C-alpha cells in the first residue's frame, strides 16, 4: 500500500527525547528523588557478572589422570558459566482467592405464610441520610480489596516440550533349570532398521556365591562397580525397531555349544532326586573346566526383547541430555512410562556359525516379521526376570560410563547402578560439556582356515600398549562383571573347533589424555587347548597384529582388515603400520583379521580441518619446535601465518557434527585471534578479518542446517547457549604469552601488542560496519548473535574495570559512531528485506533487544536518540507495507518497554509537575474529530501532548502507535494483529507493575497510573472499535442477543442496542429504533474479543490505581456525551468480566469471599512467570501470529527460548481449582472497580444538568451486572449501591426509567431464588425497597404489580437455575418486611393488603411451575402446559407475551426453530393488536389479521380488544415490546428463526410487515440489511429448487390408551418430528420416556394402525399407537399448492392407510385386499407454537380391491414418469424403477394385477368405471415403460448393452401379455348418455373421489 493511503496521526513525527543523563543530574535532586530511588534508579553499574561454577553431576569432575591435556580439549571440565544478571528484578504479586460454597435444598410446595422468612437487614427500615448511606457503602466497598488487579488476569501457559526419560533396567534373576556352572550376561540395544548397535555393553553377573567360587583363582579382587545389576539406558531416537539383546556366556569347556547346552534342555531341577548323580557329575566337570579355563568364555544362549508401544517400551523413551547439554532442565519424566516387570521363560541357543552382528540383525529382522521363526529355533528352558522403570531424577549410587560416582552417591548400597553410553543412530548435535575420552574396539572376524598349523579354538587377547615391552600394557581396559574395574588385557569368547570364528566382543578402553606414537592396540592370537595334556600349555601362540592409535597425530578409527604376523614382533614395530615390517605373515601378508575401532572423545575432533586449526593454535600458545608436522605436511615458522589463515578459512568446511561438538572451543579460539594483532617471527600478523569472517560463516552454517534446533524465532540454540553461558572475557594473565628469544627456534611466536583486550567490542563493531558482500549480508541476517556478543563483552568490561565514570564517558566516540552506523544500517536492512518479512522481523527484534541492553550500559540519552532515529527512519520509508512496518515498530517498542527500569526511563515520578489545574475530557489524539468541540477544555494530564511524549519518551511512542492502530480512519490497513499487539504491549507493562514489589505502595501506584492517564482517552476514542460482549461471549458460549446476520457482519459492533442488550433478556431479543445519545459515532468494530478484553482490563487498572480525587474532578467537568461514553464502556466491561463458572470449576466455587493465602501467591507466581522468557516469548508471537494473554509477562533476557520448558501441559484438579479461584477474584475485583466508577458518576449526578441521562445509564450498567454471573462479594456491594440509588433518585427512576425498573425487577427477583443466603438476603431487601419507593413515588401499585408478575413469569418459564423453594422463602421475607414497616403501615392499610395480594399471586405462579418441573423430560407435555398458561393470560397481554417468549426459548433450545418463530409471530400479532388500539398509523398492521399469510393460527390473538382491556390502564402493556421498535424486534427475530428453520418463503411474509415500518422511520441502514436478508432467503429458495432437497417435518399420529395416561386417555395427536425421523425413532423415544414414568413392563406400543378396541386392552397398562401420516389435500387445494414448500406449510389434514381383508387378516390375495384411508383434521395448522396438535376430526374411506389396484398402478406410473423426466438424468434410479416394472423377476406384479382385474369384464355394472380406470392406468403404465426403456438406451454405457437388450425383451413380453386386456373395452360405457348429471352426482358421492383428490397424476383419456 502506498504512503498516500496511509493516514498518520498529526503527532507521528517522533519528538526529541530529553537529555536523560543531564536531566537526572540537574533535576532529580529537586524532584521526587526518594520515590525514584525506591524504585531502584539505575545503579552506576546496572549489570552484574556471575561466574557460576558449572554443575557437575559426578562427585569429582571427569578429568585426565595427570590433570592436564596434551592439547586444548573440546571442553573445560571445570570452567565457569558466565551469566549476566540485572541487579533488580520484579517479583510476582500474590493472588488472593475467594472461597465459595453452595447449598442445595429440595423443592417443595408450601403455603407462603407457613414458611420461615430469611434474616432481614437490620438497618433497611431505619431512616438514614443518603450521604451517610453512601459513605457506609464506600467504606465497605474499599475494604479487603485486591491490591494488584493484573495479578489475577489469566496468562496462557507456554507450550512446553517434554524431554524423554531414561529407562532403568534391573536384572532380578537369570536361572536355568539346573545350576551347574557360572553364567555371565551381557546386554545392549540394537536398532534393526538402522542395523546398528546403539549402546555399549552392560555386563552382569547373577551367579550365586557357590558357583562364583569356581573362578576365585581368576578374580583376586572384585570391585563394587563390577557388581552392578541395574543399568540406565537412554535412546535419543526411539523406535519400535529397537531390541534389547541379552547374551549369556559360560566358561569355556570341551564340546560344541549344542553339546554343552544339552543338559540344560533335558535335565530339570524338579527331577533332582532322579538326576542327582548326573547333576553332581556335571557340576564337578564344570568346576574342573573353571579351574583350568576360567578366564576364557564361550557363547551359550541369548534372547531378544523388542520395544513396543506398550509398557515394555522403555526403549521408546527419550535420552537424557544432562551429560552433553548445557542446561540440566532437559530431562523430564514421561508420565506414561510406568514400571513394568518382565519374566522370560525361554532362551535361544547360540549357534557358533552365527555370532556376527550381521547375523544378529538378519535374525532380528526375520524375528520381527514372523513369529513362526521362534518355533524353528532351538530353545533352552530358563527364567529371566527384568524390571524396567523410568530412571529417577536423582538416582543414588550411580556410576557414569567412565565409572565416576554420580551425585548423590549413597555408599551404603551393595550394588551400584550403571549409566550405559548411547551410540545414537544419527548425529546428536550437542557440544561437549564434560571430559570424555573412550575408545571401543570390536574384533569382528578371524580367518585362519588356510593356516597350516592346528588352530581351532581361537581367541584374541586385546591390550592397549604405551610401548613395546610386555610390561607396557596399560590397565585402561574396562573390566567385566565380578572383577576389577580396569584390566590390562581381555580375551574374546571362543567358538569350539572353528578356524574362522566371528566375534561379538566389545573392548572398552579409557584413552589417556596424552597420546604418542608409541601408543597402539596389540592383538595376540591363541589356540586354547580344552583337553588337558601332560606338559602342554593351555595357550598356544599363533600370531600378532597391532594398530597404531595415532596416524599423523590423528586418532585412528574405522574398520580395518589387518594381517597377522607369525614371527615375534620386531623392534619399533609399534610406530609402523602392520603392513610394513619384513616378517612372516599368515597367507603372505594378506588381511585375515577384521576389527572396528570407534571413539567417543571430547579431545579428538576426528576432522581434518578442525585438527589442523587446533594444532596451529596449539603451536602459537605452547613451546614448540619448528618445523611442526601436520599430517603429511611440514609447517615452518615462516609459513605458519599463511597456514593458519587457510585453516581459519577452511573451518566452515568441517563436518557439521565435529564442528558442533567442538563449537565452544572453535569460537573461543577465533575470538582470541580476532582480538588483537600479534607478532609471529618478528612480523605483525592480523587475523581479525579472517577470524571474523570465519565466525560469520560458522554462524551462517549453523543457522542453515536443518538438523540443528532453533528457537521460535529462528535463533540457533547452540549459539545462544554459547553466548549466555560460555563466552567470557579473555584473561590477560593466562592468555598472554611473553615473547622468547627472537633468534631461537623455540616459541617466540606471538604476543599481544598490549593488553587492550577491552577494545574487543570496538573491533567487533568495526568489523560489522566494514564487512561487505555475503559476509555483510550474513552479519545482519544473524545480527542477534553479534549484538549479544557486544552486550556480553561490554557488560564484562564494565564489571571488571568497575568504572566510576559517568555513562557519557564510558565508551569512546568511535564506538558510539559505529553503533550509530550499525543501527542505521540495520534499520535500512529491515526495509530492504520487506520482501522477506520473517527475516526482517528477526533483525528488527534483534535490534530492539540490542538497544534494550544498551540502556543498561550506555548514555541513555544517546540510546533514546538511536530509538528516535529508528522510528523516524521507519516513518519516512517509501514503498513500504504499512501494516508490516507498524507491526515491526510495535514489536520494537514492546521489547524496549519491557526494560527493568522502564518506569525510571520514562521519568514517571515527573508526572506531578504538570498535573491539571482543572481536569478535562481524556482524549487520545489531537486530530480526533469526535472531540474537537472540547479542545478548550483539554488538560495535559489526559493528553498525549508533545511535552508528554518528550518527557515520557518510550510511553509516548507506545501510546502514539496504539492510537494510530486504533484510529477508526485507519481500519482499511490496520490489521487485527497490529491492534492486538499494541494493546498487549500496554497490558504487559501494567502487569509488570502489579508484579513488581517496588510498585506496591499506594503513592507509587498513583504516580504510575498518572503516567498512563492518556490511555484512558485513547480507549474512549476507540469505543466504536471495541467488541461488544453484550452480544455474545466467545468464552462463555452464551449470547445476550440473537445470533443474527447483522451481528455477524458487524463482528460484535457496538450498535444502538448496547444499552438494551441486557443479559437474560426475554428470548435474547434485540431492541429496535432506540438511539443512544452516547453513541453518535460510526459503528465499525475492528477489535477481537481478546484484544478488547485486554484493553478494558488496562482501563480498569488505571481507574483502580489513579488518584480518585483526580478522577472525580475529571468526571465532574466532562460533558454529558463523554460521560455516556464512559457508561457505555462500563456496560461492556461488565459483560466482558463476567464471573465465568465453567464445567471444570469445583463445586465450592459459587460463594466467593476474599481470603489471603501465601500458597496462592506461590502458585500464581509460577503461573504468571513460568515458561520461556524474554526473547523466546516475544518472538513466538511473530511466528504463530497468536498473541495470547501470556504477554503479561515481563520478558527476561536470561530466560531464552532455546532452553526447554518442563511445565506439564495436563493440569491437575488442584491447578484447575486454583485457576478457578483466581478467575473468580478477577471477576469480583473488575466489577467492584466498575462499581466504584459508577459511584463517582452518581456523585456527579447531583450537580450536573444531565442527571437524567446519567442515572439512566448507571442503572443500565447495574442491571446488566445483575444479569451476569457474579460473586456474592460483588452482589452484596451492588445491591447496596442499588438501594442507595433508589433512596436518592427514586422519583426520577420510577417516572422516567420504567423499562429499566422492569428489568431491574426481573434481575433482583432472579437473585431472590438464589441458594446462597447472603445473596438472597440482599436481593430481598432491595426488592422490598424497590416496591416501597415505587409506591411512595407514584402512589400507584398497579405498575409494580405488573412488573413483578411479568418478571416472575419470565423467570419461572425459562431459568434452568430457578429454585421455587428459595423464591417462596424470599417472598415470605418481603412479606415480613412489609409487616414490620411502620412507615408503610401508617400510610394506608390497604397498601399492605396490596403487597400481600401481590406476593400471593406470585406464589400461585410458582405452584404452576411445580407442574412444569414434572414434565421437563416430556417436551410435548411441557409445551402443552406452557401453552395453557399462556392461554390463561389471554386478557393480560404482558404476561401472555412473556409466556410466548418463554415457549420460544424452549423451542430454540430443542432446535425447533419454526415453532419458536411462530411463538414470536403470535407475540408480534399481540403487540399489533395493542398498537392498533392506541392510534391508527397506515404503516402499522391493523392487527393480527395482517399476519394470516404467515400463519392462519395467529387470528387467535385477535381476542385482545378494547372491550377486554384498556390500553390506557396504568401498568398494562408497559413492556418494551409494546412499541413499534418492539414489534419490529419480534418480527426480525422471527424471520431469523424462520431462515434457520429453512422456511425461507415465510421470511418474505414477515418482512412485508416490517419494511413499511422501517420506511416510515427512514431507517435506511435497517432497510439495506433487511433487503440483503431477503435476497439471501430468495437465493436459498432458488438453490433448493435447483437440486438441493428441502427437508421439512415428518408427521406421526400418536394415540394414547389406558387410564395411566389420565387426561390423555383415548386422545389422539399429530406429532411433528424433525425431517427424516423414522417410525422406530419416535416409538423408541416415547416408549422410553413413558417406560420411565410407568415402568417398562407397563408400557406397550401397538404395532399396527388398525382401530383400537379398548375392551381388549389390559387396564393396568399404558398403550401407545404410533402411525406415520402424510399431508392430505383436496383436489382444489392442489391448484394453489404448487411448490414443495406450499405442500408442507399450513397443514391441518393428514392421511394414513390401513390394509385389511374382510376376514380380519391385514394382507390377502389381490382380489381380497381392501384399504382403509383415514383423514385426520387437527385443531390448528402446522407449524404452530407447539409440535403436537390434538386431532378434532377423523374421516375414514374404504377402498375396494380394484381401487387399491388402481392406486398401486398410478404410483408405479408416477415413479416411472419422475425417473424418466428427471434432469439431470439419473441412470441408476431409472434402471432401478424400470427393473421393478418390466424386469423378468417382477413381471408377476403388474401382470398379475391385470390378470386378476382385467381378464374379464366385471358382472357388477358398478365396477365398470373402476375397470376402465384400471385399464387406462395400465395403458399409461406400458407407455411410460416404453419411454423409460428408450431413455435408458441413451444413458447406458458400452458394458450395459446386454442389460438393455434384456430390458427391451422383457418390456416386449409384458406389452404383448397386456395388449388383449388393455384393448378390451366395456361397450356399456360408450353408449350415448343423455343425462350426465345423474352419473356425475353418483360418482361424486363415491368413495374413490377422495382418493382422486389426493393423487396428482392424470389419466390419458381416449
Image: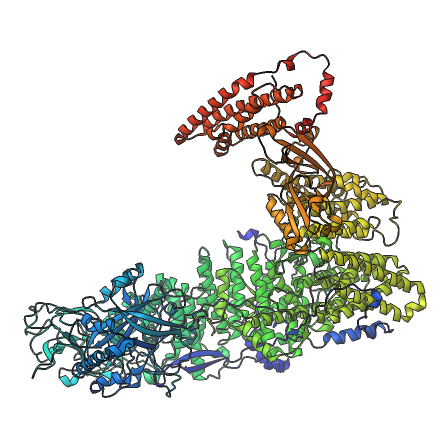
Res. 1328 visible in picture: no
- Which one is nearer the viewer's eye here, 258 or 552? 258
Q: Quadrant of residue 658?
A: bottom left
Res. 126 visible in picture: yes
Colour setting: rainbow
Q: What residue appears at the point 16 percent right and 84 percent down from the top-left corner?
A: 472
Q: Quadrant of residue 1290?
A: bottom right
Q: Is residue 1648 above or below residue 994?
A: above
Q: Position of residue 970 (x, y in %)?
A: 60, 54
Q: Position of residue 635 (x, y in %)?
A: 19, 74
- The image quadrant where one finds the C terminus is top right
- Which one is nearer the viewer's eye here, 1275 or 1700? 1700
Q: What residue appears at the point 44 percent right and 60 percent down from the top-left corner?
A: 839
Q: Position of residue 269 (x, y in %)?
A: 28, 77
Left or right, residue 1012 beside residue 1325? left
Q: How many marks?
A: 0
Q: Is residue 1011 above or below residue 1120?
A: below
Left or right, residue 103 beside residue 754? right
Q: Quadrant of residue 249?
A: bottom left
Q: Position of residue 223 (x, y in %)?
A: 28, 86
Amino acid at each position: 500500500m502506498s504512503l498516500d493511503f496511509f493516514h498518520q496521526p498529526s503527532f507521528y513525527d517522533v519528538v526529541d527525547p530529553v537529555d536523560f543523563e543531564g536531566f537526572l543530574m540537574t533535576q532529580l535532586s529537586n524532584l521526587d528523588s526518594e520515590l525514584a530511588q525506591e524504585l531502584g534508579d539505575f545503579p552506576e553499574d546496572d549489570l552484574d557478572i556471575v561466574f557460576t561454577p558449572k554443575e557437575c553431576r559426578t562427585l569429582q569432575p571427569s578429568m585426565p589422570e595427570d590433570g592436564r591435556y596434551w592439547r586444548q580439549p573440546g571442553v573445560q571440565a571445570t570452567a565457569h558459566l558466565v551469566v549476566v544478571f540485572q541487579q533488580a528484578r520484579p517479583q510476582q504479586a500474590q493472588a488472593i482467592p475467594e472461597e465459595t460454597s453452595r447449598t442445595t435444598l429440595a423443592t417443595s410446595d408450601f403455603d407462603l405464610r407457613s414458611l420461615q422468612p430469611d434474616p432481614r437487614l437490620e438497618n433497611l427500615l431505619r431512616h438514614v441520610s443518603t450521604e451517610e448511606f453512601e459513605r457506609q457503602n464506600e467504606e465497605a466497598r474499599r475494604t479487603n480489596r485486591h491490591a494488584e488487579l493484573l495479578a489475577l488476569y489469566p496468562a496462557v501457559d507456554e507450550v512446553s516440550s517434554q524431554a524423554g526419560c531414561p529407562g532403568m533396567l534391573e536384572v532380578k534373576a537369570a536361572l536355568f533349570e539346573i545350576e551347574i556352572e557360572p553364567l555371565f550376561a551381557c546386554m545392549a540395544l540394537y536398532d534393526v532398521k538402522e542395523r546398528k548397535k546403539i549402546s555399549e555393553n552392560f555386563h552382569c553377573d547373577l551367579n550365586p556365591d557357590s558357583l562364583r567360587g569356581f573362578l576365585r583363582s581368576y578374580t583376586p579382587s572384585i570391585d563394587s562397580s563390577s557388581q552392578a545389576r541395574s543399568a540406565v539406558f537412554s535412546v535419543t531416537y526411539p523406535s519400535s525397531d529397537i531390541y534389547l539383546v541379552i547374551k549369556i556366556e559360560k566358561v569355556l569347556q570341551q564340546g560344541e555349544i549344542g553339546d554343552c547346552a544339552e543338559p540344560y534342555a533335558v535335565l530339570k531341577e524338579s527331577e533332582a532326586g532322579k538326576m542327582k548323580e548326573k547333576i553332581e557329575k556335571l557340576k564337578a566337570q564344570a568346576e574342573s573346566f573353571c579351574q583350568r579355563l576360567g578366564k576364557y568364555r564361550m557363547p551359550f544362549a541369548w534372547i531378544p526383547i523388542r520395544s513396543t508401544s506398550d509398557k515394555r517400551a522403555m526403549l521408546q523413551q527419550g535420552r537424557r541430555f544432562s551429560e552433553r547439554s548445557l542446561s540440566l532442565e532437559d530431562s523430564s519424566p514421561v508420565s506414561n512410562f510406568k514400571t513394568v516387570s518382565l519374566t522370560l521363560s525361554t532362551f535361544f541357543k547360540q549357534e557358533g556359525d552365527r555370532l556376527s552382528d550381521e547375523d544378529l540383525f538378519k535374525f532380528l529382522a526375520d524375528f520381527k516379521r514372523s513369529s513362526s521363526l521362534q518355533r524353528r529355533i532351538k530353545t533352552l528352558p530358563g527364567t529371566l526376570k527384568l524390571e524396567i522403570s523410568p530412571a529417577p531424577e536423582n538416582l543414588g549410587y550411580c556410576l557414569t560410563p567412565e565409572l565416576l560416582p554420580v551425585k548423590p552417591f549413597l555408599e551404603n548400597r551393595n550394588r551400584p547402578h550403571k549409566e550405559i553410553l548411547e551410540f545414537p543412530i544419527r548425529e546428536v548435535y550437542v557440544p561437549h560439556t564434560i571430559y570424555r575420552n573412550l575408545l571401543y574396539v570390536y574384533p569382528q572376524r578371524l580367518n585362519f582356515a588356510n593356516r597350516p598349523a592346528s588352530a581351532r579354538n581361537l581367541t584374541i587377547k586385546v591390550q592397549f600398549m604405551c610401548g613395546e615391552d610386555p610390561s607396557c600394557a596399560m590397565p585402561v581396559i574396562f573390566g567385566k562383571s565380578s572383577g576389577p574395574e580396569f584390566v590390562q588385557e581381555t580375551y574374546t569368547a571362543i567358538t569350539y573347533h572353528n578356524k574362522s570364528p566371528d566375534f561379538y566382543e566389545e573392548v572398552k578402553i579409557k584413552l589417556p589424555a596424552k597420546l604418542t606414537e608409541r601408543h597402539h592396540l596389540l592383538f595376540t592370537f591363541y589356540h586354547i587347548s580344552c583337553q588337558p595334556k601332560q606338559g602342554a600349555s593351555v595357550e598356544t601362540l599363533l600370531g600378532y597384529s597391532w594398530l597404531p592409535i595415532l596416524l599423523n597425530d590423528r586418532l585412528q578409527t574405522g574398520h580395518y582388515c589387518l594381517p597377522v604376523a607369525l614371527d615375534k614382533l620386531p623392534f619399533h614395530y609399534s610406530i609402523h603400520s602392520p603392513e610394513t615390517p619384513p616378517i612372516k605373515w599368515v597367507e603372505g601378508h594378506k588381511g585375515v583379521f577384521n576389527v572396528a575401532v570407534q571413539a567417543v572423545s571430547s579431545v579428538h575432533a576426528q576432522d581434518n580441518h578442525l585438527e589442523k586449526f587446533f594444532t596451529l593454535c596449539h603451536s602459537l600458545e605452547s613451546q614448540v619446535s619448528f618445523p611442526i608436522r601436520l599430517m603429511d605436511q611440514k609447517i615452518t615458522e615462516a609459513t605458519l601465518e599463511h597456514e593458519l589463515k587457510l585453516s581459519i578459512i577452511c573451518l566452515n568446511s568441517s563436518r557439521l557434527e565435529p564442528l558442533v561438538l567442538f563449537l565452544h572451543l572453535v569460537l573461543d579460539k577465533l575470538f582470541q585471534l580476532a582480538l588483537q594483532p600479534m607478532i609471529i617471527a618478528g612480523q605483525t600478523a592480523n587475523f581479525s578479518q579472517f577470524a571474523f569472517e570465519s565466525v560469520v560463516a560458522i554462524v551462517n552454517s549453523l543457522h542453515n542446517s536443518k538438523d540443528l534446533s532453533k528457537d521460535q524465532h529462528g535463533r540457533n540454540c547452540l549459539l545462544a547457549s554459547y553466548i549466555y553461558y560460555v563466552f567470557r572475557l579473555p584473561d590477560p594473565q593466562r592468555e598472554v604469552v611473553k615473547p622468547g628469544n627472537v633468534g631461537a627456534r623455540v616459541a617466540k611466536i606471538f604476543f599481544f601488542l598490549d593488553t587492550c583486550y577491552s577494545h574487543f567490542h570496538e573491533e567487533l563493531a568495526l568489523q560489522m560496519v566494514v564487512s561487505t558482500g555475503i559476509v555483510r549480508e550474513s552479519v545482519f541476517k544473524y545480527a542477534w548473535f553479534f549484538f549479544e556478543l557486544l552486550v556480553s563483552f561490554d557488560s564484562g568490561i564494565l564489571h571488571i574495570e568497575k568504572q566510576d565514570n559517568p555513562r557519557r564517558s564510558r565508551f569512546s566516540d568511535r564506538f558510539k559512531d559505529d553503533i550509530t552506523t550499525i543501527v542505521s544500517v540495520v534499520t535500512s536492512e529491515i526495509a530492504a528485506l520487506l520482501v522477506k518479512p520473517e527475516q526482517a522481523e528477526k533483525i528488527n527484534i534483534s535490534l530492539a533487544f540490542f538497544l534494550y541492553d544498551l540502556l543498561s550500559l550506555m548514555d541513555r540519552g544517546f540510546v533514546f536518540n538511536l530509538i528516535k532515529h529508528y522510528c523516524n527512519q521507519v516513518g519516512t520509508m517509501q514503498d513500504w507495507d504499512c501494516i508490516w512496518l507498524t507491526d515491526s515498530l510495535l514489536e520494537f517498542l514492546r521489547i524496549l518497554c519491557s526494560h527493568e527500569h522502564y518506569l525510571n526511563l520514562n521519568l514517571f515520578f515527573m508526572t506531578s509537575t504538570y498535573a491539571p489545574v482543572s481536569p478535562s475530557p481524556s482524549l487520545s489524539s489531537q486530530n480526533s474529530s469526535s472531540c474537537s468541540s472540547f479542545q478548550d477544555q483539554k488538560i495535559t494530564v489526559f493528553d498525549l501532548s508533545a511535552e508528554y511524549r518528550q518527557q515520557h519518551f518510550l510511553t509516548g511512542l507506545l501510546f502514539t502507535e496504539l492510537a494510530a492502530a486504533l484510529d477508526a480512519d485507519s481500519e482499511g490497513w490496520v490489521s487485527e494483529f497490529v491492534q492486538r499487539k499494541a494493546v498487549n504491549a500496554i497490558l504487559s507493562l501494567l502487569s509488570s507493575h502489579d508484579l513488581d514489589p517496588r510498585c506496591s505502595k499506594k503513592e507509587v501506584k498513583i504516580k504510575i497510573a498518572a503516567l498512563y492517564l492518556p490511555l484512558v482517552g485513547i480507549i474512549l476514542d476507540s469505543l466504536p472499535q471495541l467488541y461488544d460482549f453484550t452480544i455474545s461471549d466467545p468464552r462463555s458460549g452464551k449470547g445476550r442477543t440473537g445470533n443474527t446476520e447483522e451481528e455477524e457482519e458487524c463482528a460484535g459492533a457496538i450498535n444502538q442496542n448496547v444499552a438494551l442488550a441486557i443479559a437474560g433478556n426475554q428470548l435474547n431479543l434485540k431492541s429496535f429504533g432506540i438511539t443512544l445519545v452516547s453513541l453518535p459515532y460510526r459503528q465499525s468494530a475492528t477489535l477481537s474479543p481478546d484484544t478488547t478484553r485486554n484493553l478494558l482490563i488496562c482501563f480498569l487498572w488505571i481507574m483502580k490505581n489513579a488518584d480518585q480525587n483526580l478522577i472525580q474532578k475529571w468526571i465532574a467537568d466532562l460533558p454529558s456525551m463523554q460521560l455516556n461514553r464512559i457508561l457505555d464502556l462500563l456496560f461492556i466491561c461488565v459483560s466482558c468480566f463476567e464471573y465465568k463458572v465453567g464445567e471444570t470449576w469445583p463445586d465450592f466455587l459459587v460463594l466467593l469471599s476474599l481470603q489471603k493465602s501465601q500458597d496462592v501467591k506461590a502458585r500464581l507466581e509460577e503461573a504468571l512467570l513460568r515458561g520461556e522468557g524474554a526473547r523466546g516469548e516475544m518472538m513466538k508471537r511473530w511466528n504463530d501470529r497468536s498473541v495470547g494473554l501470556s504477554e503479561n509477562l515481563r520478558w527476561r533476557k536470561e530466560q531464552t527460548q532455546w532452553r526447554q520448558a518442563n511445565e506439564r501441559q495436563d493440569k491437575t484438579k488442584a491447578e484447575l481449582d486454583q485457576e478457578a479461584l483466581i478467575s473468580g477474584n478477577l471477576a469480583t475485583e473488575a466489577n467492584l472497580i466498575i462499581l466504584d466508577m459508577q459511584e463517582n458518576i452518581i456523585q456527579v449526578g447531583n450537580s450536573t444538568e444531565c442527571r437524567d441521562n446519567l442515572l439512566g445509564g448507571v442503572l443500565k450498567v447495574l442491571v446488566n451486572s445483575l444479569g451476569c454471573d457474579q460473586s456474592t462479594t460483588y452482589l452484596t456491594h451492588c445491591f447496596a449501591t442499588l438501594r442507595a440509588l433508589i433512596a436518592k433518585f427514586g422519583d426520577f427512576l420510577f417516572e422516567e426509567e420504567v423499562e429499566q425498573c422492569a428489568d431491574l425487577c426481573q434481575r433482583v427477583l432472579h437473585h431472590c431464588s438464589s441458594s446462597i443466603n447472603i445473596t438472597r438476603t440482599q436481593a430481598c431487601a432491595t426488592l422490598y425497597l424497590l416496591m416501597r419507593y415505587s409506591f411512595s413515588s407514584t402512589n400507584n401499585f398497579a405498575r409494580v404489580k405488573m412488573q413483578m408478575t411479568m418478571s416472575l413469569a419470565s423467570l419461572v418459564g425459562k431459568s434452568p437455575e430457578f429454585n421455587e423453594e428459595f423464591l417462596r422463602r424470599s417472598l415470605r421475607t418481603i412479606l415480613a418486611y412489609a409487616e414490620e414497616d411502620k412507615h408503610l403501615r401508617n400510610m394506608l392499610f390497604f397498601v399492605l393488603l396490596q403487597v400481600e395480594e401481590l406476593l400471593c399471586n406470585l406464589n400461585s405462579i410458582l405452584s404452576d411451575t411445580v407442574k412444569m418441573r414434572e414434565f421437563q423430560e416430556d417436551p410435548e407435555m411441557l409445551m402443552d402446559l406452557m401453552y395453557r398458561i399462556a392461554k390463561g393470560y389471554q386478557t393480560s397481554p404482558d404476561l401472555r407475551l412473556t409466556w410466548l417468549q418463554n415457549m420460544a426459548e424452549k423451542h430454540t433450545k430443542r432446535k425447533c426453530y419454526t415453532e419458536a418463530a411462530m411463538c414470536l409471530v403470535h407475540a408480534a400479532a399481540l403487540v399489533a393488536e395493542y398498537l392498533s388500539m392506541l392510534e391508527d398509523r397506515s404503516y402499522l398492521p391493523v392487527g393480527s389479521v395482517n399476519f394470516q399469510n404467515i400463519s392462519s393460527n395467529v387470528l387467535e390473538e385477535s381476542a385482545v380488544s378494547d372491550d377486554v382491556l384498556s390500553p390506557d390502564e396504568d401498568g398494562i402493556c408497559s413492556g418494551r415490546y409494546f412499541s413499534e421498535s418492539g414489534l419490529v424486534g419480534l418480527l426480525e427475530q422471527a424471520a431469523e428463526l424462520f431462515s434457520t428453520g429453512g422456511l425461507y418463503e415465510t421470511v418474505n411474509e414477515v418482512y412485508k410487515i416490517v419494511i413499511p415500518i422501517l420506511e416510515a422511520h427512514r431507517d435506511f441502514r435497517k432497510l439495506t440489511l433487511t433487503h440483503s436478508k431477503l435476497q439471501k432467503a430468495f437465493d436459498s429458495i432458488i438453490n433448493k429448487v435447483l437440486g438441493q432437497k428441502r427437508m421439512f417435518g415428518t408427521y406421526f399420529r400418536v394415540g394414547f390408551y389406558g387410564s395411566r395416561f389420565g387426561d390423555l386417555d383415548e386422545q389422539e395427536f399429530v406429532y411433528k418430528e424433525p425431517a427424516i425421523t423414522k417410525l422406530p425413532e419416535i416409538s423408541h423415544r416415547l416408549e422410553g420416556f413413558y417406560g420411565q414414568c410407568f415402568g417398562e413392563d407397563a408400557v406397550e406400543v401397538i404395532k399396527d394402525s388398525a382401530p383400537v378396541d379398548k375392551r381388549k386392552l389390559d387396564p393396568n397398562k399404558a398403550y401407545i399407537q404410533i402411525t406415520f401420516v402424510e399431508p392430505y389435500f383436496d383436489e382444489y387445494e392442489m391448484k394453489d399448492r404448487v411448490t414443495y414448500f406450499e405442500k408442507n406449510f399450513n397443514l391441518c389434514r393428514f392421511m394414513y392407510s390401513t390394509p385389511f381383508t374382510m376376514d380380519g387378516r391385514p394382507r390377502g390375495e389381490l382380489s381380497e385386499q381392501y384399504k382403509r384411508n383415514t383423514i385426520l383434521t387437527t385443531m390448528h395448522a402446522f407449524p404452530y407454537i407447539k409440535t403436537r396438535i390434538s386431532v378434532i376430526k377423523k374421516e375414514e374411506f374404504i377402498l375396494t380391491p380394484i381401487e387399491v389396484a388402481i392406486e398401486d398402478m398410478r404410483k408405479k406410473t408416477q415413479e416411472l414418469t419422475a425417473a424418466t423426466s428427471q434432469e439431470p438424468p439419473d441412470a441408476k434410479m431409472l434402471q432401478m424403477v424400470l427393473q421393478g416394472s418390466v424386469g423378468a423377476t417382477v413381471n408377476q406384479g403388474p401382470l398379475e394385477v391385470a390378470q386378476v382385474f382385467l381378464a374379464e369384464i366385471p358382472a357388477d355394472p358398478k365396477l365398470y368405471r373402476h375397470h376402465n380406470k384400471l385399464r387406462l392406468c395400465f395403458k399409461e403404465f406400458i407407455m411410460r415403460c416404453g419411454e423409460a426403456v428408450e431413455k435408458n438406451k441413451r444413458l447406458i454405457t458400452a458394458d450395459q448393452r446386454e442389460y438393455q437388450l434384456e430390458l427391451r425383451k422383457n418390456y416386449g413380453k409384458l406389452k404383448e401379455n397386456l395388449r388383449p386386456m388393455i384393448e378390451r373395452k366395456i361397450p356399456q360405457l360408450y353408449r350415448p348418455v343423455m343425462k350426465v348429471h345423474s352419473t356425475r352426482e353418483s360418482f361424486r358421492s363415491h368413495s374413490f373421489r377422495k382418493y382422486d383428490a389426493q393423487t396428482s397424476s392424470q389419466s390419458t383419456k381416449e
